Amino acid sequence: MDKVIIHIDMDAFYAAVEVRDNPDLAGKPLIIGALPHERGVVSTCSYEARKYGVRSAMSIKEAYRRCPNGIYMHPNPEKYKRASDRIHEIWSDYTDLVEYISLDEGYLDVTGTANSFGGAKNIGHEIKSRVKNETGLSCSVGIGYSMMSAKLASEEKKPDGFFEIPTPEALKSLIIDRNVRIIYGIGQKTAEILQKAGIRTVRDIYENRQRVISLLGNHGLKILELADGRDDREVTPYAEVKSIGKEHTFQQDITDFGYLKDALLLIAGELSFDIRLKGIYCRTITLKITYGNMRAITRSKSGDATNRADEIYHTAGEMLDKIEKRPVRLVGISLSGFTKSAPRQISFEDIGSDDRKGKLENMKFELQRKYGGNIVKTGSELEAEKRFK
């Protein structure tokens, strides 16, 4: 049976949520991220801001230089998470094979369910309609025979678009004269290697197959497959493969590593809440550090599966203690190696105080789930929050 894949991408998600909740922002260049006088980057921006050349991941200073009359706002993660949860619920009504790429983007494999809903096109239109009616937000939908074709289809008519790429021939016809970066897996560095060899478009790839292989080896072979419309990747449910991370960029470089641990404590609490909501546990904890000179490092540790904030924090803190002590610009934690069960045997150390800690975390989570993520804090978190802010 031929695959049928749908890719959905919300339109300027964070900005759209803010406009939905405050219609006075409609039609204005809205930039979500840091404020102009702060250090940070653009998380997302409205299409009006994009007309000025503002884009995601751009430094906020550069965004302000290009769009000094824009409206700058800090993000509201909890609000966006609530909107995302509702959107994800809608998507999951059509298949259990959903791979969430982020809060606002995902792939649906509807190969086995499309006929039950009147076909993939009907599912796509129905999702667009439901998302608009139930959340007040718009999305772009792409339908394809593979993950790459569905992704390209969703990008073709943004915003609020709908497009289908039904066959490899249709994909090749669409992309043949476009820049090589349209192909999945070709990032900036790979594009630069190809461009130095005079390979700038997909047509150039077709006409220089051996040259691509000699330049890029096995990666070149994969690029040729994708350029020919062959993509055998599978839509994999979120919890099986993805990492979840949070980080914080400081307005001034930090030399006080106790202060950095306060940041890690708060981040660990937020991540614990996120994975508990999903009913999953992580086996790998990664510490991310960017020094003041922009040198970035990561340190990872794998062990027993956990969803507990104190264990995530303790592991990240131990790794922080071992790194070079220099001014730090950014600190973060990411979790990976997810499982739906915690294969962890109780030891003598788990009995007593540690068990009470576990019960306390469970109680805290239930309160947060019922009343909101910030409704309850431990004493340590309150102290860290005071110092951190």
Image (cartoon, rainbow, N blue to C red):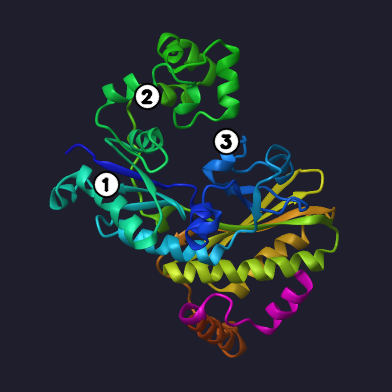
Left or right for 321, reference 358: right
Badge 1 vs badge 3, beta-carbon distance below 8 Å? no
Looking at the rendered structure, the number of numbered marks drawn on it comes to: 3
Say whether residue 269 is magenta: no
In the image, which residues are magenta?
Answer: 368-389
- Looking at the picture, does residue 270 appear above or below residue 299? below
Secondary element at image label 3: loop
Name the residue carrying label 2. 225
Residue 272's x, y, as percent?
55, 70
Left or right for 371, reference 333: left
Q: Which mark is residue 51?
A: 3
User: Mark 2 packing: few (<14 Cα in 10 Å), some, or many (20+)?
Assistant: few
Kindly identify the amino acid type of the residue bearing the numbered disc 1. Answer: Gly
- Looking at the picture, does residue 39 appear above or below residue 200? below
Kindly identify the amino acid type of the residue bearing the numbered disc 2. Answer: Glu
Q: Which mark is residue 53?
A: none
Secondary element at image label 2: helix
Of the residues tagged 1 and 3, which is closer to the observer? 3
Disc 2 or 1, which lies upstream in sequence?
Answer: 1
User: Mark 3 packing: few (<14 Cα in 10 Å), some, or many (20+)?
Assistant: few
Disc 1 or 3, which lies upstream in sequence?
Answer: 3
Left or right for 352, reference 128: right
Name the residue carrying label 1. 124
